[in-house]
Amino acid sequence: MSKKYNISVEATLEVIGGKWKCVILCHLTHGKMRTSDLKRHMPNITQKMLTQQLRELEQDGIVNRISYNQVPPKVEYELSDYGKSLRSILDSLCAWGEQHIIREYGDKFAVLEDNVLNHKKLEVQTTGAEQL
């Protein structure tokens, strides 16, 4: 069967679209993570949905699943080289989201959760403010 797209962004959204895939990928830009780590950083996702999204990303070659032969079993996920090619897209989405939050709410830290993805930006802003 030959697949047809109207425009190429449809192909992109087929792979990384939906509520959770970009969030998972943003977390994985910080390095390997176990499912439990991802779940802790994404408390609103169900275990079933997280597992499903990780499987789909793995099938599309975006993430690597690393299974360690040990007891208890250990599995980690990381961005594949192909997945790393999405970094500029993910960075752009985050930057646009921050601008949108500021436009809509004023103070982005009033609505952004306190998590690892937001700490770097907070540290940079704090450091910048101290230098003024």
Image (cartoon, rainbow, N blue to C red):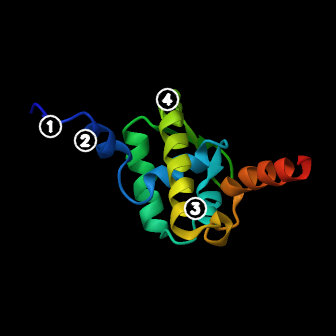
What label sits on residue 125 in the rendered view?
none
- From the image, tell me which residue sits under label 4: 85
Mark 3 or mark 1, which is nearer to you?
3
Q: Amino acid at mark 1?
A: Asn
Secondary structure found at label 2: helix
Counting the numbered discs, the total is: 4
Query: Pointers 3 and 2 in contact (CB under 8 A)?
Result: no
x and y percentages locating residue 125 in the rendered image? 77, 52
Left/right of residue 34 with respect to residue 59 in the rendered view? right
Secondary structure found at label 1: loop
Depth order, front residue of 90/60: 90
In the displayed structure, 1 sits above or below 18; it is above
Q: Amino acid at mark 2?
A: Glu
Q: Which is nearer the N-term, disc 1 or disc 4?
A: 1
| Residue at left offset 59%, top offset 45% | 28
- From the image, tell me which residue sits under label 1: 6
x and y percentages locating residue 50 in the rendered image? 47, 60
Mark 3 or mark 2, which is nearer to you?
3
Q: Residues within 10 Å of mark 3 (few under 14, many from 20)?
A: some
Q: Residues within 10 Å of mark 4 (few under 14, many from 20)?
A: few
Cα separation, mark 1 vs mark 2, equals 7 Å
x and y percentages locating residue 10 in the rendered image? 25, 41
- From the image, tell me which residue sits under label 2: 10
Query: Pointers 2 and 4 in contact (CB under 8 A)?
Result: no
- From the image, tell me which residue sits under label 3: 102
Cα separation, mark 2 vs mark 4, equals 17 Å
Cα separation, mark 3 vs mark 1, equals 33 Å
